């Protein structure tokens, strides 16, 4: 009976949640990616401060920097478009 209790207790322990990316990435067709100059990186935005790679709105820049975006597109065909981007 003691062994049954241990087994039933193990079954009740919840599985830890998966940690994943919370930033939605949008698929871009390769034809469009190659044919157009798409403004998709922080470096294309009015809110980007190049001297310290920061955003004047206080948003995270690392997922939206050009080097990160190009790498993401090469791996998955998707990039993380910033919903607050303002183009000069």
Image (spheres, helix red, strand yellow):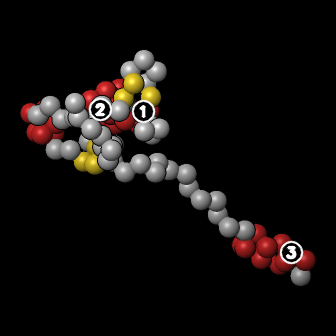
Cα separation between marks 3 and 1? 57 Å
**Helix, strand or loop at mark 3:** helix
Residue linked to disc 2: 45
Image coordinates for residue 67, horizontal then vertical, percent: 35, 26
Secondary structure beneath dot 1 equals strand
Q: Is residue 13 above or below residue 16?
A: below
The x and y percentages for residue 82 are: 33, 43
The residue that mark 3 highlights is 3
Q: Nearer the viewer, mark 2 or mark 3?
A: 2
Residue shown at the point (42%, 33%) measured from the top left? 56
Identify the image quadrant of residue 50. Answer: top left
Question: Mark 2: which secondary structure?
Answer: loop
Horizontally, is 3 left or right of 33 in the view? Answer: right
Name the residue at 33% across, 44% down. Answer: 84
Q: Earlier in the sequence, mark 3 or mark 1?
A: 3
Left or right of 62 on screen, residue 39: left
Contact flag, marks 1 and 2 (Cβ < 8 Å): yes
């Amino acid at each position: 009976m003691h062994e049954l209790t241990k087994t039933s207790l193990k079954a009740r322990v919840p599985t830890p949640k998966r940690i994943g990316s919370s930033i939605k990435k949008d698929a871009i067709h390769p034809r469009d990616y190659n044919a157009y100059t798409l403004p998709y990186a922080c470096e294309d935005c009015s809110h980007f401060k190049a001297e310290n790679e920061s955003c004047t709105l206080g948003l995270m820049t690392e997922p939206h920097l050009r080097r990160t975006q190009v790498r993401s597109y090469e791996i998955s065909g998707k990039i993380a478009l910033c919903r607050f981007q303002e183009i000069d």
